[in-house]
Amino acid sequence: MKKSQSVVIAGGGSTFTPGIVMMMLENSDRFPMKELKLYDNDGDRQAVLGEALEILLKEQAPDLKFSYTTDPKEAFSGVDFVMAHIRVGKYEMREQDEKIPLKYGIVGQETCGPGGIAYGMRSITGMLDIIDYMEEYSPEAWMLNYSNPAAIVAEACRVLRPDSKVLNICDMPVGTLRRMSQIVGKTPDELEVSYFGLNHFGWWTSVKDKESGYDYLEDIKTYVAENGYLTQVEVDTQHMDESWQATHKKAKDLLAIEPRFLPNTYLKYYFYPDYEVGLSNPTFTRANEVMNGREREVFSAARDIIARGTAENGGFHIDSHASFIVDLARAIAFNAKERMLLIVENNGAIANFDDDAMVEVPCIVGSDGPEPLSQGKIPNFERALMLQQVTVEKMVVEAYVEGSYQKLWQALSLSKIVPSAEKAKELLDDLIEANKGYWPELK
Amino acid sequence: MKKSQSVVIAGGGSTFTPGIVMMMLENSDRFPMKELKLYDNDGDRQAVLGEALEILLKEQAPDLKFSYTTDPKEAFSGVDFVMAHIRVGKYEMREQDEKIPLKYGIVGQETCGPGGIAYGMRSITGMLDIIDYMEEYSPEAWMLNYSNPAAIVAEACRVLRPDSKVLNICDMPVGTLRRMSQIVGKTPDELEVSYFGLNHFGWWTSVKDKESGYDYLEDIKTYVAENGYLTQVEVDTQHMDESWQATHKKAKDLLAIEPRFLPNTYLKYYFYPDYEVGLSNPTFTRANEVMNGREREVFSAARDIIARGTAENGGFHIDSHASFIVDLARAIAFNAKERMLLIVENNGAIANFDDDAMVEVPCIVGSDGPEPLSQGKIPNFERALMLQQVTVEKMVVEAYVEGSYQKLWQALSLSKIVPSAEKAKELLDDLIEANKGYWPELK
């Protein structure tokens, strides 16, 4: 009999919260819960989802103790896990992250380049706050962090909370593995991968059949060289946005520049920034799509549930793809020794890369946390690209810690996405203005 | 009494040859010569300078044995030093190196970015040829190589002729030190520097008075923050091209992005490529300036000397600035233990940088060659930029060795100067076409 767990979701007001809560209900045999709490520092926003989920949970999981709060003590006391998907500044600030660079003809993206840097500078304080709450009120708990920009957030944790029990994980490799499994007619569970890189910046070096050991790498490459990662299964079943379809297709060109490995799709922002800018509408970006789409849908579904007083035939949709969060939680809770990609301090996992870099590699996760699997030496090309990018991430955290304008200017100038130090400075001045009240003051 | 030396200049047809020969005459007390030969694989071009120099030397150094030849055996036999300033493809190909990138709105420059990569691919075979001639006909000789692109050429020597006695040196740090000395009212000989970087990609960390030990770094920074390296002395005395004036001034903005150190002026191509492209005329580049200016002047001065049968009142001008070549030669010949910046294999000189990278650092040069002076650890910002650039250089040499289209595409994509993999591929295809007969065939 598995011990029932207490969980708090930090970022309770996220549009992802209902889907994740429903996914957790569905996985209650694998990961039984006795209590679930939502925490957010925006009480009004969270209350809408909280009230609707209260109705839903009373109907679907009457034994689960549920609450939502803006009080840290209430939220973080007596929990086994903190699941963190915070978004400091919400979609209004994401919109700025995307639109300010685009004004200069530079990629505007949530996690890559100037947008990611701006978002990173905003997110560090928020992340530290919830880590500190967890450590104060539930010192034995683990945080499962899938807040973006994961690379910068993970580096900030490494530097500023080195001993905290925070696991940084990203859903992108999970999603791509799902597509790979469709390509070869398997389920993701039947495959196991080798991978090296940084978050949103890496390459698969093998995709093996768990049973036979057969490596599908070449088969998948052959498919990707033609179609990218876009699979007919997903086109038919997922009602995928056109912009995501384009992203998965573009992997074809990422394989072209490095045919040895299978690429993370986010590499397109680094290798093909001009193409990405060409696709972008500087006045209507992904943040606008989300605000007009998912955000509106989720909150109106919540309001509808509240108005009707029942979640039956309600508009909340289960987010089955997020089940990696349960995989991770149960690996910790029940010492499951699950093999997963996590963002961890390198310490030799990539042999010819800095020990103190936060890298993304396969790990074996048990009750003591992750044990990274050694990925050996990587080629010079990837190594140089990764050092450039990880140094940007490190310098953002240094700029945050030191309140240094100079370091943040250098970080922006160093980014592969930013074409010059001059553009970097113009961008920086705009970003400072837009992020007043969110960033530490820079001198 | 110093032993008189035998020297061959490889690239005898260079516009720099007369000025360097005259500089060597002027330095004959420091570096006595008994024989001087010119070697070039373009006999017609060299003959013009050779015939004129023969007239000049008969008048000014009648005891010096002088000859010019296209025969490697004749040229490279019985010499103590090979001074190499070859330019494979001459200015006609430099013009292509500059104009092809500019077509795409990308920096077109002799040594930086795509132009430097193209020139590097052309130069390796030529460099290996003259190294092999030297080793066959004068196995005890040293080569003093100041051929561009020095970084790629030096890496090719490291990989392909690891045991050869080749010293790679660049005149740029020497020229900048001259300007620094003017700024503080000293002579270059009174100063000694610390420096780290790659060729055309580095920073001074100290500029000390040899006698007092006083470090002028902050004083020079104060001047450079205002004026760059442009000094009134040079403006008044050197009739400096406007484009060079702009280069020296621009150092101001290089100091702005990294205020800790004094920058090598070539960094402007990496930090301010958009500014540089804005200054460029895509139909009339530096190669055109040189072909219309220095090349025409030097060759018409030569023809005039030949026609008149005397070099008296002739148009050859001494290149006093090139005296670093004599400094280097005499350091080897007479074990002078001269402190100079050279391009050498790192091997820990920069503590936190790859051992097998060709770096530019101060060395003590004696008869056994250079002993690099340890420069300690460098900051993350410079380290990441340098790894990106040195990896480009390494991959160019690998592409040359393997005949690999893919590696050269990757090298171009990795360059900070090239904005995307797509542009890199278009550039590469153009460069291959333009360099037919010069590059190895790429597959």
Image (cartoon, coloured by chain):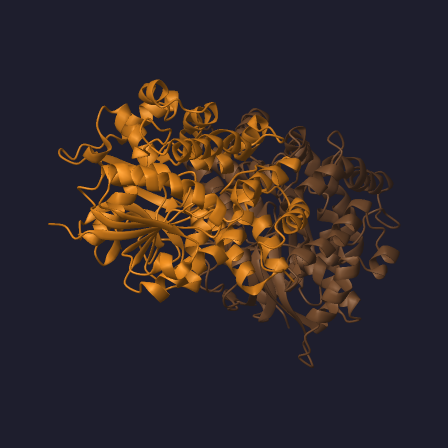
Chain colours: A orange, B brown
Q: Which percent across, then down, holds residue A129?
A: 45, 60
Q: Quadrant of residue A78?
A: bottom left
Indicate the quadrant containing the C terminus of chain A: top left, top right, bottom left or bottom right: bottom right
Q: In the displayed structure, does residue B256 sit left or right of residue A172?
A: right
Q: Which percent across, then down, holds residue A191?
A: 22, 35
Q: Is residue A204 visible?
A: no
Choose between A299 and B46: the one closer to the eye. Answer: A299
Q: Quadrant of residue B63?
A: bottom right
Q: In the displayed structure, does residue B415 sit left or right of residue B290?
A: left
Q: Which percent across, then down, holds residue B163?
A: 43, 54
Q: Quadrant of residue B322?
A: bottom right
Placement of B379 over or under A228, stated as above or below: below
Choose between B388 and A363: the one closer to the eye. Answer: A363
Extreme-bottom residue of the structure = B212
Say which residue appears at 21% left-offset and 35% top-offset.
A189
Choose between B124 and B36: the one closer to the eye. Answer: B124
